[in-house]
Image: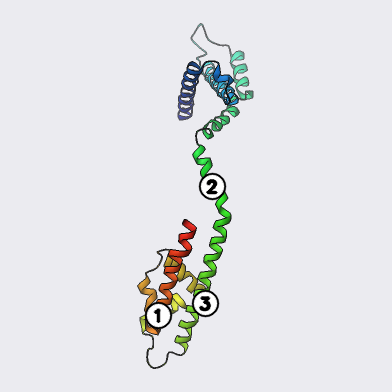
């Protein structure tokens, strides 16, 4: 409660100072300019805030031991009036004043909303590219695990990496996405591909280069 009242008084003081400075600088033009509605709103907020402070002072004024004390009935009337008054609700309008000074934030949010459509189709394109390479690499790795031949069978570590990174199309898609988003070490992924054939290493590197320098560059550019 104390912090709330202190904050209320501080903001009221700042609003009053701002209003006085603006009226002193602009005179009657303050109420006749293009932003006359904002000027009236500022004035209304300041008046209601000052009225709120006055009501707080009357409510918390000592009621005993003073010749200026207020009777119980008068105090009850003031308390009832504090309940029905709308100045507490009007304080929410203060937030509207903030939006006048955050035009850059509004422009940023608007720009993000306008780019959502392009971002969606860029993500669709990225998913299709990842899916195409994932199907190719998963098929090659799993075929080699089924029939490795005699020349280059997978070692224990490479076989574990092959199951982990290329065990299914879903795992391969996740591996490729992690590869372009710094979520996995390329050396761990390249282990089974090196054993199978150097050509598939170049395929993997081509995917990385194409995604980095073509797709993501277009999206971020």
Nearer to me, 182 or 69: 182
Q: Residue at x 47, y 18 (%)?
A: 25
First in sequence, mark 1 or 3: give its number: 3
**Residue at disc 3, secondary structure:** helix
Nearer to me, 77 or 166: 166
First in sequence, mark 2 or 3: give its number: 2
Q: Quadrant of residue 158?
A: bottom left
- Real-space Cα separation, disc 1 to disc 3, in angstroms: 14 Å
Residue bearing mark 2: 111
Q: Are discs 1 and 3 less than 8 Å apart at CB?
A: no
Nearer to me, 116 or 159: 116
Residue bearing mark 1: 193
First in sequence, mark 1 or 2: give its number: 2
Q: Residue at x 57, y 50 (%)?
A: 114
User: Nearer the observer, disc 2 or disc 3?
Assistant: 2
**Residue at disc 2, secondary structure:** helix
Residue 129: mark: none
Q: Are discs 2 and 3 less than 8 Å apart at CB?
A: no
């Amino acid at each position: 409660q104390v912090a709330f009242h202190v904050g209320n008084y501080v903001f009221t003081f700042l609003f009053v100072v701002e209003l006085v400075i603006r009226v002193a600088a602009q005179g009657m033009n303050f109420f006749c300019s293009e932003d006359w509605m904002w000027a009236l709103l500022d004035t209304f907020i300041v008046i209601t805030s000052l009225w709120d402070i006055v009501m707080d002072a009357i409510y918390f004024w000592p009621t005993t031991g003073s010749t200026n004390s207020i009777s119980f009935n008068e105090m009850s009337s003031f308390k009832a009036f504090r309940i029905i008054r709308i100045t507490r609700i009007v304080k929410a309008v203060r937030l509207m004043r903030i939006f006048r000074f955050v035009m850059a934030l509004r422009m940023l949010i608007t720009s993000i909303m306008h780019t959502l459509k392009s971002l969606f189709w860029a993500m669709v394109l990225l998913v299709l590219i990842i899916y195409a390479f994932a199907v190719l690499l998963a098929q090659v790795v799993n075929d080699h695990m089924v029939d490795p031949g005699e020349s280059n069978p997978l070692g224990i570590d490479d076989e574990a990496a092959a199951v982990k990174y290329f065990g299914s199309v879903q795992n391969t898609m996740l591996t490729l996405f992690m590869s372009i988003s710094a979520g996995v070490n390329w050396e761990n992924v390249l282990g089974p591909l090196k054993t199978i054939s150097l050509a598939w290493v170049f395929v993997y590197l081509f995917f990385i280069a194409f995604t980095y320098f073509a797709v993501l560059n277009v999206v971020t550019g």
